Image: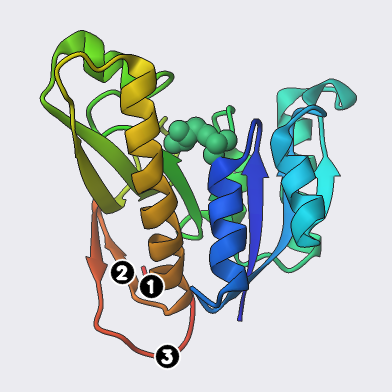
Amino acid sequence: MTKIGVLASGRGSNFRALCEAAKRGGFDGKIIVLVADQPGAGALEIAREFGVEALTMSPGDFPSREAHEEGIAKALEERGVELVCLAGYMRIVGAPMLKRFFGRMLNIHPALLPCFPGLHGQKQAVAHGVKVSGATVHFVDADCDAGPIIIQAPVPVEEGDTADTLAARILKEEHRIYPEAVKLFCEGRLKITGRRVQILPARASGGAKK
Ligand code: GRF
């Protein structure tokens, strides 16, 4: 069973979707820790609800950005975390996390990458006038929202959509595809070759193959 750690900054609906999927056996993994970088993050409350250890690690409690990330990475490592899921984690991860977890760290983004990376992907999509946007689960690398793509779900942009109405429809897809990507990881079915992620046929043993 893959040991999963989740990092979140905000309300935590994707974290909840992962907790619910774990509970119903949607993947062969156990969420063992939630780390929030904001003391008020809704995700902390969800962790308590699902009996997941919850840590608040605020950047202000560390001497530097690097030390903050190092602290989080060590906390995950000490608990034997094998897969890290960023779920609305509003920080760019750097060397301390990447050196330990590259190929074992996923993120969810509310747009069809490489379109509309960064903040407010839904607002960017509406402003640009695209007819289709969606959600992406990808491996995390050193660049923002740029790592190898695992699953994407398209969501049509409708006449009269605002960033909020589009975001609500995209969110439903996020909650569907994030647990699906975690399931594939836990089954050892994700093979990264350069920018591409190949989904291997069903097999035993967890972890991403490089
Ligand atoms: C989601 O839209 C996710 O794609 C993005 O941040 C948002 C987090 O929402 N990275 P929640 O905290 O999971 O509800």
| Circle nearer the N terminus (2, 1) | 2
Image quadrant assignment for residue 29? bottom right
| Residue 43 position by quadrant | top right
| Residue at (76% x, 51% y) in the render | 47
Closer to viewer: mark 1 or mark 3: 3
Name the residue tied to disc 3. Answer: 204
- Asked if the residue at tag 3 contacts the one at tag 1, i.e. Cβ–Cβ closer than 8 Å, the answer is no
Q: Residue furthest right?
A: 61
Residue 51 placement (x, y as % from top left): 81, 62
Tags 2 and 1 touching, CB below 8 Å: yes
| Residue located beneath label 1 in the image | 209
The answer to whether 188 appears left or right of 5 in the picture is left
Q: Residue at x 82, y 52 (%)?
A: 48
Measured as percent of width and height from the top left, residue 193 is found at 25, 61
Q: Is residue 46 above or below residue 89?
A: below
The amino acid type, in three-letter code, at marker 3 is Ala
Q: Which residue is mark 2?
A: 191
Within-10-Å neighbours for mark 2: few <14, some 14–19, many 20+? some
Q: Residue furthest bottom?
A: 204
